[in-house]
Amino acid sequence: MLKLKLIEKEKSPKIEIGKARLLVEMRNIVKKFYRVVANDGISLSIYPGQIHALLGENGAGKSTLMNILYGVYRPDEGEIYVSGRKVSIKSPKDAMRLGIGMVHQHPRLVEALSVAENISLSLTDVGVFASPRVIKPRIMELARKYGMKVNPDAKIWQLSYSERQRVELLRVLMQNAKVLILDEPTTMLTSSEKKELFSMLRKMASEGKAVIFITHKLEEALSVSDIITVLRKGRVAAQVAPEEVTVEELARLMLGYEMISTVKREPHRYDGVVLKVENLHVLGDAGVPMVKGVSFEVRQGEIFTICGVAGNGQRELVEAITGLRKVARGKVFFLGRDVTNTSPRLLADMGVAHIPEDRIHVGIVPDMSVAENLALKKYRSPEFSTRFTVMYDKIYEWARSLIKQYSIIAPSEKIPAKHLSGGNIQRLILAREFSGEPRLMVAVNPTYGLDVAATNFILSKLLEAKKRGVAVLMISEDLEQALKVSDKIAVMYEGQLKGIFPVEEADIREIELMMVGVK
């Protein structure tokens, strides 16, 4: 049995030095969704001057617990104390008044407004007068300081998923919260941006602020945190100091068993070209060129990964390939057939599958059931419908088999998909897309925000598809992960491919420099 020394609160180095009082205490928090117990009597103590990492596999209750602290959810049982006083946090506005800010895993912004307008609204909510014009210099100052590409005049609907997350981060930074909750904040950052973020968090902690850092990346928790709380199945499994535990031990604590990685790239003989992109030009939402003369091929049984910092044309490229955005110039060929500007439905019927970047707003219909989401591409088939009727009994039976096959944790195939954890939503999307036996899989950041076990599962499924001869086009900002599974890696910067490398010849430092525009 794994034995770890648990950390007593008074023994934390930060607490001993500052002799700090308890800033936030959550006592015996219970939260249920339908028959799923997300939090089962969790108690958590947060001290000023600490970076507190919160670990757990997807569905362990991390985000739910922090959403309770931030006022998004109300606990079914339990109490919350801030600076020794019992409080009732009924909304995020209450939380902000108490000095608690949160950067959500899924950005919550007003899409019709600009970056500056969104940040201005949030500052007004906490009693600070700041017009968009006045705060623009402050936004740009923070963006430059932390290496973020942010246009304060851009509308939120024009931004990629990761760019929206950066706006959330800037917004909370400008609220001067005493407690800063970050839910998977590094998923879309380069290694240099991560280092800058960690430096900022340490500075905030040295100034007496408490930072709660939710992450599925075990190495990050070890490198940046002062204390780590591990959740498993809605309960606290352990609380450890980073210097007293290894990555393998943390993984075992998080999962309850020792995980054996099944992610292993194997050489494969590539067959015919499945996807060919030829001199492609695509406009962005603002009408400016975002993809500028891109050409490449993806062959049968090959994983071709495009790496790059968000906002360099990856989203527009994928949308053009999958029929979601018009091509301005150039050609897209699928199995030798010109499919330029073909509809998404026809492409899906031909064998093009798509795991989108934004799994909540694009990947699923949140209010529809798990079964209905699984059947989105197949409900028209004779297997599931007649001329006048959808045969739900058969859809439910089929959905139950996919739920079992892809290990989707759901109390019923009939519950709304929005009640699943992020990892289980991704498994749902994967199950739906692979159930159509695709010839081409377009996967955009497929392991975004997922824990080590879910990441292992997703990558294993992509490798299995490769063995079956599926061509895989993956878009990823996780370079280390891309090197593990890819056959070829391309670098995209400002709408152009700056280089294409066989993985055996790829140099991680050279690629990182190319990702930020350095040749």
Image: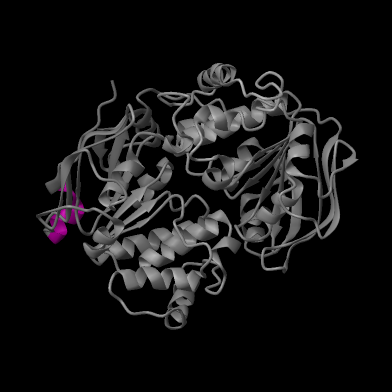
Q: Position of residue 33 (x, y in %)?
A: 33, 33
Residue range (magenta): 11-18
Q: What is the chief secondary structure element of the magenta stretch?
A: helix
> Which image quarter: residue 482?
top right
Q: Position of residue 483 (x, y in %)?
A: 63, 41
> Which image quarter: residue 401?
top right
Looking at the picture, tell me which residue is in the foreground, 67 or 6.
67
Q: Is residue 462 visible?
A: no
Task: Specify the quadrant that holds the N terminus.
Answer: top left
Looking at the picture, tell me which residue is in the foreground, 509 or 146.
146
Question: In the figure, is residue 268 to the left or right of 94?
Answer: right
In percent of the image, x 68 and y 18: which residue is there? Answer: 383
Question: In the figure, is residue 141 to the left or right of 489?
Answer: left
Looking at the picture, tell me which residue is in the foreground, 372 or 82.
372
Question: Residue 143: within the magenta?
Answer: no
Q: Is residue 12 visible?
A: yes
Task: Specify the quadrant that holds the C terminus.
Answer: bottom right
Most distant residue in the front direction: 388
Q: Position of residue 294 (x, y in %)?
A: 80, 56
Quick check: 511 above or below 334?
Answer: below
> Which image quarter: residue 130?
bottom left
